[in-house]
Image: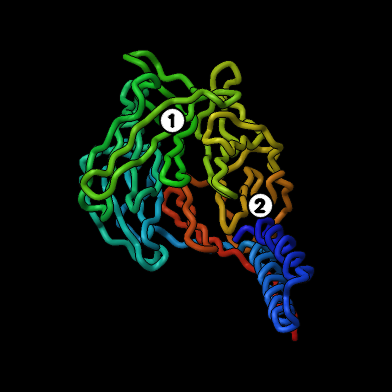
Amino acid sequence: CDCSQLKSVGLVERKHWLTDANTTPKQTKMNLARVLLLLAAIEACKAQSTFSSLNWSSLPIAIAGYSRVGMQIATLNNSIYLLGGRAQAANLYFADVYGSDDEGRTWNLKTSAAPWAGRAYFAVTTAANHLWVIGGQLAPSNSQLTNTVYRSANMETWIQDANLTSSVGFIAFMQATTVNNTIFVAGGCARQGMAACVYVNVVQVGVISGTGASLSVAWTALNPLPYTVALAMTISTRQGAVFVVEGQAGGNLGWAWQKTILVSTNGATSFISQTSPSNSGAKQAWAFNDTLFVLGGDQTLSFSSSNALSFTSLPQTGPIPTQGDASVVIGSTVFLASSATLFRGVLMRPPSPSP
C-alpha cells in the first residue's frame, strides 16, 4: 500500500465525516468507527514499511556443472527461472532455462535450446504475464551483440517479438524493468554496423498492446540519462517511477561507478539525480512494498520509502553477497544469483508490541 496516499485520503474523509452538519447521531457514530478503522489501516501500512534486518542464506545452484556469468534470474507466477549466461572456463554461451518452485532448492530444465540462441549480459523483465529476453552478447566479442526480443508464458514455447530500435543498434550489458505494461531498457553498450560498442545514455521504451496471439511490443528510444551507462540497474517503485540505480559509466568517464540514483516519474522522458547511499557502487537494487533497497559494493544495505529517497541503513545477517549477476524479488524475499551460488535474503520486521 501507499501510506502517504492512504493518510491523505484519511485526513480529508475524517474532516468530512466528523463535521458534516447533516449527519444524524447514528451516522456520526458510524463515521467515527470508519475513521478509527482508517487510522488503524494507516498504522498497519506504516508497519509494513518498517524493517529490522535482511537475513541472508546461500545454497549451491543444484544444476550439474553450473557456474556462469552474465546469466539472468527472473520470476513469473511465483516460480524462479535461471536463463542463459556464459561458462567462463569453456567460453560457452547457453540458451537454456531452468525453473524452481521451491525457492531455488531444486531446479527443473524447461528448455535446453531456446530459440533466442546462447547469450549473456542480456536483460529480462516480466510483463503481460510473459517473461521477456532482450538483447545481449552472443559471443566473446562486442561485434556479436543482438537487439532481438523474445517472450514466453511457460519457458518452453518462445515467440520472437519486435527488435529493439535500430537507431540504437545491437546492445548488451543493460537492464530492464516494467511499469504498467511498458518495458524500460536502460543503458548498455551498443554497436552500429561493425564498429566497437559504445556506452549509451539511452532508455528504450517498449509499449505492450494486445492480448493472447495479438500481443506485441513497439519500441522507441529516448536519450534522457545524464551520462552513458553500462550495467545499469533499473528498478520500478512508488507510483510507477523508474529508477536507474548507480550504473557503471563508460565513454570519457572510463569505468567509473556513478554514485547517483536517477529517478523518472514521467515515463523516462527525463530523470532527476539523487544521492546514492553507497560510496563504492551498487551491486544490486530492488523494490518491495513501495520501498527501494540498494545493496552497496561495500556490502552495506540501505532502503528508502520516501519520494525524496532519504536512505536508512539496514543491518544484514548471514553470508552477505560480495557479488551478483542478477536479482529478483518474490514478496519480501530477494534472490541473487552469483556464479554457482544462489543467495536468499529475507526481510525481517520488528517484533509486534505486546498487547
Q: Position of residue 47 (x, y in %)?
A: 68, 68
Label 1's element? strand
Numbered disc in front, either 2 or 1 = 1
Label 2's element? strand
- At label 2, the amino acid type is Leu
Which image quadrant is residue 109 in? bottom left
Inspect this view and state whether residue 52 appears.
Answer: no
Inspect this view and state whether residue 208 appears.
Answer: yes
Number of numbered tags placed on the structure image:
2
Front-lying residue, 197 or 156: 156
Query: Is residue 200 placed above or below 98 in the rendered structure?
Result: above
Residue sitting at x 61%, y 50%:
292
How far apart marks 2 and 1 lie (CA) works out to 29 Å
Residue sitting at x 71%, y 69%:
43
- Residue at the farthest bottom position: 355
Q: Position of residue 202 (x, y in %)?
A: 49, 25
Please tell me how crowded label 1 is: few (under 14), some (14-19), or many (20+) other residues with Cα within 10 Å.
many
> In the image, is 300 to the left or to the right of 68?
right
Residue sitting at x 37%, y 30%:
219
Front-lying residue, 67 or 14: 14
Front-lying residue, 275 or 38: 38
Which image quadrant is residue 241 in? top right
Front-lying residue, 335 or 306: 306
Numbered badge on residue 301: 2
Residue sitting at x 34%, y 53%:
129
| Quadrant for the C terminus in the image | bottom right
Which coloring applies here?
Answer: rainbow
- At label 1, the amino acid type is Gln
